Structures are given as C-alpha cells and as structure tokens.
Amino acid sequence: MNSKAAHYIGAALLAGSVLVPAAAFASTAANTNISNTVTVNFDDASGNAQTAVTSSVSFSVNLVASAPILSAPADVNPATENTAYNLVYTVTGTANGLDTYNISNASVDTNMDGAPAFAGDVSIVLGGTTVAADITAGATSFTVPFDGTDDSIVNGIAVGDTIVLDPTGTGEVATVTAIDESTGAATNTATITVSAALVGSFTAAQIIGQQDTATVEVTTDTVTTPPSGTHNVTVTYTSAADAGVTAADSVLFTVSRTALTVTKYVRNVTTPNTDGLGTSITFDGNDYYDSGVNGAPAETMEYLVVIENPPTYAQADNIVVSDPVPLFTTYVANSIQMDVNGGGVTAYADTADNGDAAETDGTTIYVYAGAGGDDTAAGLGNGTGGSLAGGETASVVFQVTID
Amino acid sequence: MKVFSRFATAGALVSAMLFSISAFAAPELSLEVKAERDAKVTDENGKTTTKRISAESASPGETIFYTITYTNTGDEAATNVKVDNPVPDGASYVDGSAWGDNSDLLFSIDGGKTYKKASALTYNVEGKTRTAAPEQYNAVRWVVKEIKAGSEGSVGFSAIVK
C-alpha cells in the first residue's frame, strides 16, 4: 500500500459515509417488522367502562447499503511478468442487512504492454443485522431483530459464519455456533450464540456485520522497456442494493523482467584443444568453448560460468551460483576464482563460512557471485549472494580432473 | 274492538322502540392507524417533490408519521376516552411531534404504567431528580373528554426508525 492508494481508500470511505450517515452508527436490522398498536379505553355517557378497542399498523425496515470494510493486501514488489498473484481481501459488512457486493477491477499501467488479466471472485455476499438489546461483556448469546423467516438464517447470517460486532467501532470478531429463530413470531427477535464469550459490551442498534474473504487473481503483463513497469490495480466493491455505495483498495505491482543470463564454457587445461570447437570466449588470457572440447582421463578441465545482467535492466541481488561437479570428474581443491565486471580475478578457499565468496564440499560448488557476496552464514550453500547492476558481468571458473 | 286492537298494535310498536333504545344505546368506537413517510418523487420533468405515502417499509433514520383516527359509530357519546400508543420497538419518539383534536397529552417513561404531563416526567439518577428527555418517552396518551355519537377526531405523533 503506497500513500496514494491509502488516499484513494480514504476518499472512498468518506464518500460512503457521506452517502449513508445513519448506517455507520446505530440502526435496526433490515426486514425487522415494526408494529404500532393503539388501545382506546372509554366509558359510555353514564360513565360505564366499555370494552377497549385496538388497532395496529406495521412496516418493515429497509436495507441501508453501507460500504464494507476492506483489508489492504500488500503491494507486490518485485512481481514477475505473466505471473498470477492472489489478492485476498477480508471484507466486513457494515450494513443493517444482507447485501451483495460486486467486485470490479481496474489498473493504471506504466511501461507495461497491457493491463493485467483479472480472475477470481466477482462478488461477495455478506449478511448483516443489529443488536436488539444491550449485550454485556462475557455474553455468549444475544438477540437480534427477527427477519420474518424462521429458517435459522437471520438476515444472511448462518451457523459457522464469522461476524463482527460494531464493525466500525469496537470491531469484535466472533463465530456463530447457533441461531434460534423459533421465538421470532412471538418476540420479534432471534438469538445468536457465538463460540466464545464476548469481550466487549454492545448497545442496542449497533451493527453486526458478516466477515468473509474474497480473492482477486491478478496476472501481470509484460514490461515494455526493461527493467520494470507497474500495474496500479484498484479493486472496487459496489453494493448491489445501491450502486453509489462503494469501497476500494489499490495494490501496486512493480513488475521486473527476469534479467540474468548464465552461460557455461569449458577448456582443457592439460591439452588445449584446437580443432572442431564451438563458440569461444576469452577470459583471463584463455579461450573457453561452449562445445567440442574433449579430454582424456587424468586431464584437467576448467569450467567458466558467465553471469550477465543485461544493460538497462534493474540491479540483480542475492545472486548465488550453485554448480554440481559433473559425474566422472573430481573437483580440484581451491580452484574457484571469480572476476566481477573486469575488476580482477580473485581466488577463493573451499572452506565453508570463512568470509570469502565461495564454498564447496567437492560435490557442489557455491559462489556468491557479483559484488558483496560472502559465505559467512553458517552451513554450506547458506551464504549471501552478491549483486550485479544492469550491464555488469560476473565470471566464475573452477577446475576438475577427469576420472 | 277494532279501535282497541289498533291501539294495542301501536302501543306494542312504541314499547318495542323504547326497549331497543334503553338496551342498545352505546358508544361504539372504530379506530384506524396509519403509518406514513415522506418520499421524494421525481416527475417526468425531473422535478422532485416530497409526497407523504403509506409506509410499507422504511429505512433507519426515516421519520414515520402515525395518525390515529377514531369515529364514534355508536348512538351515544363516548366519555373519558384514553388513546394509548406505546412508541414501537425500533423507533423513538420525535420531540414535540404529538398532536390531537380536543385532547390533553400525557407521556410515559415506564412503558405505559403511568402517564404524566411532559414537565412532570422525572426520574432519579444517583439521588438527583431529572426531567425525562423526549427520546425517553415510550408511550403517548391522549385524553379526550367526550366523543359525541357520529363524530370523529384524530391524534398522532412521529417516530424515527432506529
């Protein structure tokens, strides 16, 4: 989350609260039946009491859409081209009833060939209700308004669901273990039981929102000009009941192109080959070849590993070269050397954890290639890789004898 | 004989009518309660006006206008009439909203056990006497001295949906 993203979210939440000022504070659950009964007692002209008459009228409470609360998945840096990433959102309802939130995605792309591809959840449904009567701390069950249907699901909240009491305030999370709506017709309330005693106390008409997760899959596109570009992805949750009620979050993907190229060459040290050889490269006064080199048992062969970070690409860090010694050859002790970008050839001891840039047990060679690498961290192969800036090259050599 | 018999018939008729009045003359109240709300209505010219419509449903924060209409359909006046209306669960009384024809207005803060004039509604908190705030009223009573036979009247109040 960068500051710009935070700003967007702040604006979205603000807009939501301006649109529905009532919902965020205290409310009665959607579908609650509010009945008003009038009783008239009267006497006749002589003062004799007559039978009272009554009359009733009722209405139901509407859903008031309210922007859900979103978690903020971390920015992704570095991200890899053409790779899928899952943004997992924890979404908490703040409305007084069940609502569906449609998920839409957009991206502002910089130095990318195209927009990312989106997949995953397209909507999330969250139940919602309100506190019917004050709840004291330590309670494991409490009442909420009856939604008119005795089906053990009260305004979209069912057994097993995660709910948040007073989501915009105290925000206590609980798990529903039972719902009793059997007394709904008589008392106009249902009872929710949760798995653990509530820590907080809550007052009537505070919101109880369902909490669930939604996953948005973002597949990065390719970088136009190396080394990197960005997808600034905005995920928006829009109330199906009121399209004006939205919540949004932005996640910045910094996409870097995989930069290093590794090429391996070899030469016969004992009897230099001269004919039928492949592409050659000269290093430290010797010619190495990518094919066609041969040797006889007991002869010494020298491998050259060239690691290149192409020009204009981002710096590559933590570069570790691990190279198993080939079958039917024996590593020549203390033969590892490295040159970093023409800075001079340095020889390293095989000893592990001695502070230089290489270590080996004779079976696998580890070189912490580039600038600044070392084998200090305990254990073979656990050292810290070096760095190569764009356009820099590291060349590693080591020797074996043919068995 | 003829004359007598005619008198007898007329006398029987008169007594039957008298009997009817003394046995069945009574006040009879019929009652209607309306719940209404103000809805914004946009006409075809795009002009928005507020229209009071029947409240089938309402949103939290909305004001509900309750109107209670009583009619004496009997043939005798109703006296000492007390119209009692608990403020519904899920709604709160709007300050100053109660009104009524030819009636005295009382309120209750104990769920309708006792009714008093607003200024006399007090309760004790830590030994101090305080006057109840309108949102604490949980029942309204209109006292109407007399509803004459055949006449009608209305009372009402407003409540905000919690």
Image (tube, rainbow, N blue to C red):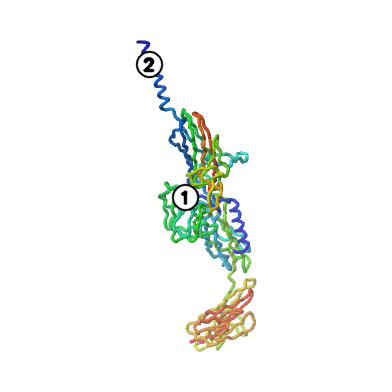
Q: Name the secondary structure under disc 1.
A: strand
Q: Nearer the viewer, residue A293 or A125?
A: A125
Badge 1: chain ID: A
Badge 2: chain ID: B
- Quadrant position of residue A368: bottom right
Residue matched to label 1: A145
Residue appearing at x 61%, y 76% in the figure: A388
Residue appearing at x 37%, y 15% in the figure: B8
The residue type indicated by label 2 comes to Thr
- Asked whether, in this view, residue A225 is left or right of residue B30, the answer is right
Furthest residue in direction front, as rendered: B127
Q: Name the secondary structure under disc 2.
A: helix
**Residue B70 to residue A198: above or below:** above
- The Cα–Cα distance between marks 1 and 2, rounded to whole angstroms, is 67 Å
**Residue B102 to residue A384: above or below:** above
Q: Nearer the viewer, residue A351 or A222?
A: A351
**Residue A153 to residue A40: above or below:** below
Q: Nearer the viewer, residue A132 or B14?
A: B14
In front of the other: label 1 or label 2? 2
Q: Position of residue B129 (x, y in %)?
A: 55, 50
The residue type indicated by label 1 comes to Pro
Residue appearing at x 41%, y 22% in the figure: B17
Q: Nearer the viewer, residue A293 or A130?
A: A130
Q: Position of residue A120 (x, y in %)?
A: 51, 59
Furthest residue in direction left, as rendered: B1
**For the residues tagged 1 and 2, is the chain the same?**
no
Residue appearing at x 48%, y 82% in the figure: A327
Residue matched to label 2: B9
Q: Position of residue A235 (x, y in %)?
A: 56, 58
Is residue A235 at least partly visible in the picture? yes
Q: Position of residue A260 (x, y in %)?
A: 58, 74
